[in-house]
Amino acid sequence: MELKRTVKQAIHSANTLIERARSQHLTLAVTGLSRSGKTAFITSLVNQLQQGNTPEHLPLFDVVRERRLKHVRQVAQPHLNVASFRYLAGMRNLTATPPKWPEPTKTISEIRLELTFKAKSNRWLSGSEPSKLLLDIIDYPGEWLLDLPMLNLDFQQWSEQQWHLLEQPPRKDASADWRQQALALLGREPCDDAIHECADHYAKLLKEFKQTLGLSLLQPGRMLMPGDMEGTPALAFFPLPEQCLLDDAASKALWHILKARYDYYVKHVVKAFFKRYFSHFDRQVVLVDCLQPLNEGEAHFREMQQAIGQVMNSFQYGEQSWWQQLFDPKIDRLLIAATKADHVTIEQFEPLTNLVEQITEDARRYASFSDIKIQSQALASIRATKFGHVQQGKKTVPALKGNRISDGQSITLFPGDVPPGLPSPAFFEQHSFNFVAFAPQPRQSDYAPLPHIGMDKAIEFLLGDVLK
Amino acid sequence: MELKRTVKQAIHSANTLIERARSQHLTLAVTGLSRSGKTAFITSLVNQLQQGNTPEHLPLFDVVRERRLKHVRQVAQPHLNVASFRYLAGMRNLTATPPKWPEPTKTISEIRLELTFKAKSNRWLSGSEPSKLLLDIIDYPGEWLLDLPMLNLDFQQWSEQQWHLLEQPPRKDASADWRQQALALLGREPCDDAIHECADHYAKLLKEFKQTLGLSLLQPGRMLMPGDMEGTPALAFFPLPEQCLLDDAASKALWHILKARYDYYVKHVVKAFFKRYFSHFDRQVVLVDCLQPLNEGEAHFREMQQAIGQVMNSFQYGEQSWWQQLFDPKIDRLLIAATKADHVTIEQFEPLTNLVEQITEDARRYASFSDIKIQSQALASIRATKFGHVQQGKKTVPALKGNRISDGQSITLFPGDVPPGLPSPAFFEQHSFNFVAFAPQPRQSDYAPLPHIGMDKAIEFLLGDVLK
């Protein structure tokens, strides 16, 4: 059985590689929870490929170190109905005075690059044609992956889970008014307008959970960015307490209206998203910001951990998985990157990498079963600080120098230790974190590539094999 | 030929009527340019049907006068992915202190009513089952109909038309910067980001034309409410001057990029909208606010006249029409209503009705060829004023009393004459209009139906025959 699976997977992998070599086309998906640095990562990726073509700048990216990358240009994106990733708009922000981070995109977006390179096989044959690779980079909100578990839950199970969450801290206080409003709907003949009102209020609550409380487990995810679904019944649902089913006919009628909407949403929004996109992704980047949740405290850190766990479930392609059978995904490489590595000192890279590995451990174990290659690393897509030292009493300690984003001040500081593994409750009681957010550095010249930490290692993992 | 057509149409009409009687289902579409009063009309329509069931309140609505309307209730709308028309939210606004007009909807929305009535045929048979009619009311922005001519134009023809408009008053001054930006794209290799920038600027310009200049002929209409199309290439196009085609290869390349996007938009947005909706509409209401354009002056009045002309083109179903062949529309009644009749004095209703008839004359002539029944009338969906008289010197003149919307003040005034037909340029030079906008009146009771002018006549025309 084990052997049969291995052989089958080996054949599958070989076929995929042959297919890719022929078509010379790769789709790279980039995701992460909001504020994890997706736009900065893609902006840097495009910039490194276009302007960073020197072995000194990208020493770990083979095709550059071997001077085989000829040129990289943006070409027309494949889908006219998908938002464009605005690379130059981001670069304008980074070049402004003072420099600003690129605007985050709010929905799915894409950009296509054409890479012209000399393949290794014809490296010494003069006059041979250069090879070409079409690279599609797709950016989508990690929050959309958090709807994935809904595919496996009916309205009753989902309601139970959500209602339970709402009754616990950190959601308990903020959700009290809303729960009262929802309960007031019970026992009366359902009124469409009152349901809409309650759903509008629920959407506001989810936005508050996200923006004020910094929480990530927010379903239905599309309530946070409804687009064309604004005001539709498909998005006008919310969890109900189970007592509806035991109670009077009016409450049951309400339950059935919301159940129908939940079912519609799961089928036509969640499932449709995965069907449309996931079968086309070849490689996936998951970006994780560990520092901000550490700043915010234990509840937030656990929530982030749980949300990333759910995101990672999307990449568990076991042979028996319902998921595999439903969407036939073909991702074969998965990069998990702890971003904002420039916001800690250099000796913290190892604990930071350890931390992100532990956060994603279960999923990584599964993914490796299903023949997906995985790399975890620390990363600064666009490096905003310089390393240095400061005197603390008689000791010289490592430090960062950069421009604090809150007031633009140039500061030098030791930002604190990253915990050496998943922090325990006791750890949170004893430590408080205060990682500072930095603004990007002014650019030396429009032609200089963006400074980075670890982008060469990341790009080599994501593209190296197809640029051989 | 003429006879053959008439017979064919008669058979078609008979079949349609039979079909409708059997299914007892009618779809009523309501449109008009923005601020023409669509939301107020639908709010009033639902309110009159639900609360206005007395012969004194709706004397011209037969089923009510004959006391055959049993009850009317809102039931679940048919499409979960279409925004809900929020009737009760509008009623809450009207009942607020001070009363406010309902919020305008920004996109397509729908509401379904179930009417229970006694059919005339079994009027005197005791114990017979009451009949039921399912009425779907659909509200959509009139601006979307203004994209219809794009179906008949290629990118070159459209560009010429639009570029011409941009070079004339009232668009000339406001568009000067944008035209410079567009011309600066010529002769350079097309850059996707620069095209997006220029399209973003064009979208801003269209919004300015609408909001600041009050113009209506704005293409592509979806730029004003992009929804999920925000930031996509399908919406990142704009007209180019024809010289592109004569010039260098770079300008031609730009032309071809924009042409492909234009073609995509026409096929997947404009055509898709008509295909999805138009074949399902049974009856259509077109609302026209003649007063505000008269206030704004000749250029605006002409633009409104032209826009309404284009909107009306959507209802010209000649036998040979490409439009008919493409979408198989089946609208058989068309109500054209000059709204805000309560903003003029009673003796002005006739000139107001004449005016709206003349604005829509061409289209009405065509529509009547194709067996569509048409009614033109003046209307106040929700009456905001009372009629009275004021003394002007020694004369007693008719006057209006209401609460001015700008400051909430109760005022009594003679608002001015509506021109007795399409006003000439000379007429605009000699007259200036100043129709005042009024706030809704406070409601006497939550159970009282909304006051109106002419809603009974409108509803009888739209629904009377199916409630026989």
Image (spheres, coloured by chain):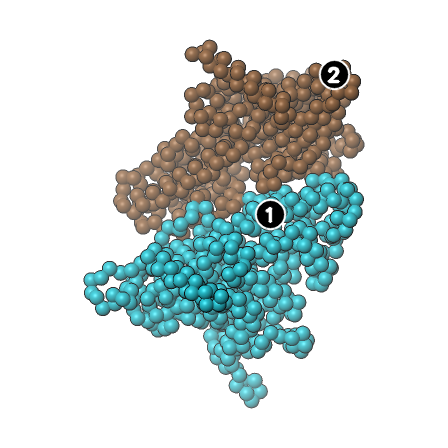
Chain colours: A cyan, B brown
Q: Amino acid at mark 1?
A: Tyr
Q: Position of residue B295 (x, y in %)?
A: 57, 29
Secondary structure of residue under mark 1: helix
Q: Position of residue A376 (x, y in %)?
A: 49, 70
Gap between marks 2 and 1, in whole Å? 45 Å
Residue A252 visible somewhere in the drawing: yes
Residue at screen point 64% across, 34% down: B111
Which residue lies most toward the top here? B3
Between A181 and B177, the one lying in front of the other is A181
| A245 shown above or below B142 | below
Residue B462's label in the rendered image is none
Q: Position of residue B464 (x, y in %)?
A: 66, 19
Which residue lies most toward the bottom here? A394
Instruction: Check disc 2 and report the residue beneath it.
Output: B123
Residue at screen point 55% across, 56% down: A322
Give residue B462's quadrant in the image. top right
Q: Amino acid at mark 2?
A: Arg
Residue at screen point 40% across, 51% down: A77
Q: Position of residue A25 (x, y in %)?
A: 37, 56
Q: Is residue A174 left or right of residue B360?
A: right
Between B379 and A291, the one lying in front of the other is A291
Between B254 and A55, the one lying in front of the other is A55
Q: Is residue A393 left or right of residue A100?
A: right
Give residue B161's quadrant in the image. top left
**Same chain for marks 2 and 1?**
no
Give residue B246's quadrant in the image. top left
Which residue lies most toward the left here? A127
Instruction: Check disc 1 and report the residue beneath it.
Output: A265
Tell me the quarter of the image containing the C terminus of chain B.
top right
Q: Is residue B89 left or right of residue B269?
A: right
